[in-house]
């Protein structure tokens, strides 16, 4: 049976993920709606910087997921955490609609409980399992086990978008900039984003991020670490080298941020997952 992988556009880009079928988010800046599909990231960053208003995002409607599903295939969908977006619920509605027409077809939706590089690693995992031509039950079991282990962290170069979107107050953003406070954010294991630590100074924050990896039980020789960067490849490469010098990960991949990751991590933002 042919296998079909679909993701939403919180999955970031490299040569292995760029050809995966994507269902795009919408990004709303001022009165303009941008479809998160082959977006010019630099132009998106310019538009974000030029507005003082809230930048909104919206997941795709169910019918867009339906259009990507195939009746003569084993279908797998990977979405951003259901705690962060309605994308998972939209995909589930799509599955119900699809099964009414094609009740014998196989579809499974994975809630990544993550975002950006974390979700991208999970899409990687599903694609690799599909290429091994194992049965659908084994793909679901192995992927769910993997999801339970993935940890995601991010460091923002700017808090402007979090303030614009009401995630933090303008005062807190201004105070953090004045005091050179750098928050290290991450998922809580259930798909919500929480503050992990606050560190003074970007250099110290990245050093602490590298150190935090040692606090988790990681099977390094069999684990891939991913770094997503928002317009800061040199910073990502430096972080990769520092991590490689300290931990024997199987591989470290660097991803270019998609539109949704760009909106929330903002220019200069770094996301890691392992």
Image (tube, rainbow, N blue to C red):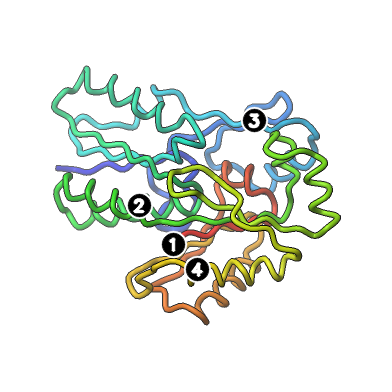
Specify whether 237 is left or right of 73. Answer: right
Specify whether 195 is left or right of 102. Answer: right
Q: Looking at the picture, tell me which residue is in the foreground, 199 or 89.
A: 199
Contact? badges 4 and 1 (CB < 8 Å): yes
Q: Which residue is mark 1?
A: 274
Q: Looking at the picture, tell me which residue is in the foreground, 182 or 269.
A: 182
Indicate the quadrant containing the C terminus: top left, top right, bottom left or bottom right: bottom left
Q: Which residue is mark 3?
A: 56
Judge depth for marks 2 and 1 and give the one in front: 2
Labels 3 and 2: the sequence-earlier one: 3
Expressed as whole percent of the image width and height from the top left, the position of residue 236 reads: 60, 66
Expressed as whole percent of the image width and height from the top left, the position of residue 5 reads: 31, 43
Residue at the image point whose x is 49% and y is 49% from the top: 188
Labels 2 and 4: the sequence-earlier one: 2
Secondary structure under badge 2? helix
Secondary structure under badge 1? loop
Labels 2 and 1: the sequence-earlier one: 2
Secondary structure under badge 3? strand
Labels 3 and 1: the sequence-earlier one: 3
Contact? badges 3 and 1 (CB < 8 Å): no
Q: Which residue is mark 4?
A: 213
Q: Give how far apart the Cα atoms at labels 2 and 4 are.
A: 16 Å
Judge depth for marks 4 and 3 and give the one in front: 4
Q: Residues within 10 Å of mark 1 (few under 14, many from 20)?
A: many
Q: Which residue is mark 2?
A: 148
Indicate the quadrant containing the N terminus: top left, top right, bottom left or bottom right: top left
């Amino acid at each position: 049976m042919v296998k079909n992988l679909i993701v939403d556009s919180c999955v970031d880009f490299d040569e292995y993920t760029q050809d995966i079928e994507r269902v795009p988010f919408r990004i709303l800046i001022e009165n303009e709606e941008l479809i998160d599909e082959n977006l010019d990231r630099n132009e998106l960053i310019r538009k974000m910087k030029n507005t003082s208003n809230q930048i909104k995002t919206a997941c795709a409607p169910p019918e867009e997921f339906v259009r990507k599903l195939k009746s003569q295939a084993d279908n797998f969908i990977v979405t951003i955490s259901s705690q962060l977006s309605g994308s998972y619920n939209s995909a589930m509605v799509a599955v119900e609609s699809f099964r009414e027409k094609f009740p014998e077809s196989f579809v499974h939706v994975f809630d990544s409980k993550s975002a950006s590089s974390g979700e991208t690693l999970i899409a990687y995992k599903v694609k690799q399992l599909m290429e091994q031509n194992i049965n659908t039950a084994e793909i679901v079991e192995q992927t769910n086990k993997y999801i339970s282990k993935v940890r995601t962290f991010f460091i923002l170069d700017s808090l402007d978008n979090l303030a614009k979107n009401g995630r933090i107050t303008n005062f807190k953003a201004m105070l953090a900039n004045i005091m050179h406070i750098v928050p290290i954010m991450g998922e809580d294991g259930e798909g919500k984003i929480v503050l992990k630590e606050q560190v003074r100074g970007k250099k110290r924050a990245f050093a602490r991020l590298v150190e935090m990896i040692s606090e988790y039980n990681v099977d390094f020789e069999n684990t891939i670490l991913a770094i997503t960067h928002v317009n800061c490849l040199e910073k990502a490469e430096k972080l990769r080298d520092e991590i490689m010098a300290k931990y024997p990960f199987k591989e470290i991949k660097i991803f270019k941020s998609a539109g949704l990751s760009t909106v929330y991590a903002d220019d200069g933002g770094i996301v890691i997952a392992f």
